[in-house]
Image (cartoon, rainbow, N blue to C red):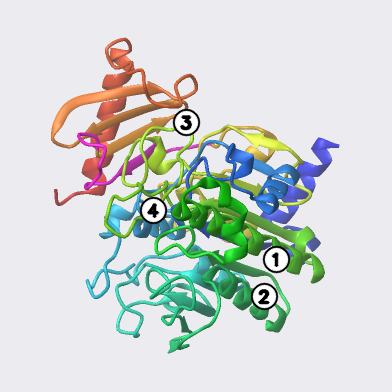
Amino acid sequence: MKVIIGALAALVLVGAGPATAAKPNIVLFLADDLGYGDLGCFGSTIKTPNLDRLAAEGMKLTNYSVPSPVCSPSRAGMLTGRNPNRYGIRDWIPADSKIFLPKSETTIATLLRSAGYRTAHVGKWHLNSKMDGSEPTPDTHGFDHWFSTQNNAAPSHHNPKNFIRNGKPVGPLEGYSSTLIVNEAIDWLKGAQQGPFALFVWFHAPHEPVAAPEEYRRLYADAGDPTKAAYSGSVTLMDHEVGRMLTALDEMKVRDNTLVFFASDNGPETHLRYKSAVHSHGSPGPLRGMKLHVTEGGIRVPAILQWRGHTKAGQVCEEPVFGLDLLPTLCEVAGVEAPKDRALDGASVLSILEGKPPARTTSMYWQYDLSISKPWTLALREGSWKLLGSPSSEKVALYDLSADIGETNDLAEREPDRARSMAERLRRLYREINPAK
């Protein structure tokens, strides 16, 4: 039976024969600042029944890492399959900073649209510094429809005023951003023409300014801290909206042919790191560090994949999967060729559906120059081994993540040959990605 399923999957993936008429739909959910320990299915006490069910019916990825420990470069890497330092997105993008995802970059949305997909982005964009059309907006990068904000929903995630729909300001809205985003997604799906679709649902939650309805905050009244109740409530509200989106896919009878992926953009914010981060009670679980760290707490996040007929119920993937893998993987899913005119830093990971590791030609590499995890601003991962380093020092730290998920036991002195060879590859990648430095 496994051989038959694999053969059928191959027909769909390469677009052979009659299977080309059934290209899978794609729904990519992205949370903002959600920690590795913030979902019930990853050990949290926060109530997330819909995501827990999605994991139980599909695949939980326990070793999924994002391209960067901070928002904008992480999102850019996911869309392009390329390390964001290659094209100048090195940190979160402030408003009016004139930093944006260049038009010269090819995104997965552009590639999917070229393959006949209808595409939409709803929610937080954060890949430009202004949404007035003077810089690239979601439509520039392949989205037919967009209902997006430059950064956070403002002035709050409750009753925001800064959404732009297809280039036109929407004005004041009533409700919570997680609900408004899913409302738009469902309306777009119901009004769109027939054919495969790719829908990117990028929540603002649980990033500050956190907001949640009283009925969701009340679920956590025993927390003894109203700011913690608000954080947990915002996660549960987001979970509710994921469930509502999945129900809509069921009602439209498209769920069986839809690849659904959920992840966070980076690790959780540190409580009170800045003055208004009063609600930031996210948890990295057993990991070291948080957002802005190149240690695991900044880059490893909860992730779930469900693709009926391909993932098995209760499946757990422990293979390292990278946010930069999304573009080559979805290209293979959609039967479209990945760009060959530029370096890609990820790999297709469809082999994980059969419990096999991806065939990588490039090591997993992170660079965040402003990392809080000083002196470490660089990281390299190969299999279970992870090296931390910096461009200004020969000193490194080496960890075996299969035995030390918390990065507590530095093995660089015990494994000098491995540390030396990985350090050489780390510095080679640094020079390639930063030719001007």
Kindly report which numbered mark, 2 or 4, lies closer to the viewer in this rendering: 2
- In the rendered structure, the answer to whether residue 59 lies left or right of residue 420 reads right
Q: Is residue 97 above or below residue 424?
A: below
Q: Are dots 4 and 3 in contact, CB under 8 Å? A: no
The residue that appears at 68% across and 82% down in the rendered structure is 192
The residue stretch that appears in magenta = 359-376
Q: Position of residue 169 (x, y in %)?
A: 43, 88
Q: Position of residue 354 (x, y in %)?
A: 69, 36
- Dot placed on the residue nearer the N-terminal end, 4 or 1: 4
Callout 4: SS: loop
Q: CA distance from mark 2 to mark 4?
A: 30 Å
The residue that appears at 34% across and 85% down in the rendered structure is 132
The residue that appears at 38% across and 53% down in the rendered structure is 82
* Amino acid on which the number 1 mark rests in the picture: Arg
| Residue named by callout 3 | 286
| Residue named by callout 4 | 82
Residue 244 image label:
1
Kindly report which numbered mark, 2 or 3, lies closer to the viewer in this rendering: 3
- Dot placed on the residue nearer the N-terminal end, 1 or 2: 2
Tell me, yes or no, if residue 433 can be seen here: yes
| Residue named by callout 2 | 186
Q: CA distance from mark 1 to mark 3?
A: 30 Å
383 and 166: which one is in front?
Answer: 166
* 364 magenta-colored: yes
Callout 3: SS: loop
The residue that appears at 32% across and 35% down in the rendered structure is 379
